[in-house]
Image (cartoon, rainbow, N blue to C red):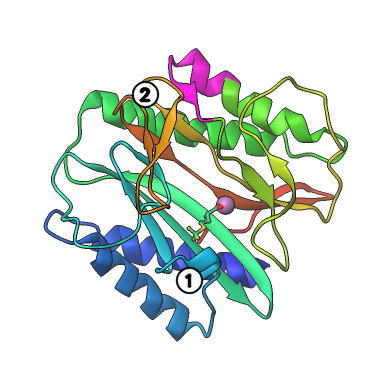
Amino acid sequence: MRRAGKVVAEMHEACREAAKPGATTADLDRVAREVLERRGARSNFLNYHGYPAVICTSPNSVIVHGIPGDYVLEEGDILSIDCGAIIEGYHGDAAFTMPIGQVSKAAQRLIDVTERSLWAAIDEMEDGNRLSDIGHAVQTVAEAAGFSIVREYVGHAIGTAMHEEPQVPNYGPPGRGPKLRPGMVFAVEPMVNAGGPGTRLLDDGWTVVTADGSLSCHAEHTIAITDNGPEVLTLP
Ligand code: MF3
Ligand code: CO
């Protein structure tokens, strides 16, 4: 899983480099495909329930699962890029949100808080803590900043499949659910809206947008619980 995680991190770096004003989201999908090919990795997104690309690109009010296409990135956009890879049957899955050129203070704050909520959750991923401590940490950080947490989409365990049980919600009380043990691996993925928490699915059957049109931000890492604490597998 470490190797799959490294490929995902490399997809992030390549996409981050390519995500400039004037580029299309389809350009980013091509860049990500090149990394998969170069590393001899397979895509876990492509053909997943018919999904047509190897990454998800979710600009502005798109929360998750935006399909790469002819959307042209513009200065001032924020863009979530979600990537996955399979190496020798093991999966990696991670996402980040980036500013395209100069963005508003409000947009940058949403990005920073979402990232901070993910790292607060990672800090909780210690032997003996409980599953719901993860989501509680995300929710506490995001709501303290005045943002809201999406409920309809959640993180997940990950291993020889991308989506394994149990689910990992980004909200809830602490101290509930199974104990976290070394060897468990989770994809933790806060989805944080600047406005209300509501979501709407577009007619393409994939693209999830905020119900109120507000900006949304997504960050995700694949994290293993080890005897020495959390190990983030999807860092470069
Ligand atoms: N990364 C997404 C997740 O965390 C998976 C996207 S599924 C796809 O669940 F089909 F859109 F690729
Ligand atoms: Co995921």
Left/right placement of residue 39 relative to residue 222 reads left
Vertical comparison of 87 with 61: above or below: below
Residue at image position (43%, 69%) is: 54
In the rendered image, residue 175, in percent from the top left (x then y), is placed at 82, 24
Picture disc at residue 46: 1
Figure quadrant of the N terminus? bottom right
Q: Nearer the viewer, residue 26 or 103?
A: 26
Disc 2 residue type (three-letter): Ala
Residue at image position (11%, 58%) is: 22
In the rendered image, residue 144, in percent from the top left (x then y), is placed at 51, 14
Judge: label 1 CB < 8 Å from ligand 1: yes
1 or 2: tag closer to the N-terminus: 1
Vertical comparison of 192 with 91: above or below: above
Total numbered circles: 2
Residue that extends furthest to the front in the rendered view of this protein = 203
Q: Is residue 153 visible?
A: yes
Residue 98 found in image quarter: top left
In the rendered image, residue 38, in percent from the top left (x then y), is placed at 44, 84
**Which residue bears the numbered disc 2?**
194
Disc 1 residue type (three-letter): Leu
For the magenta stretch, what is the residue range?
Answer: 140-150
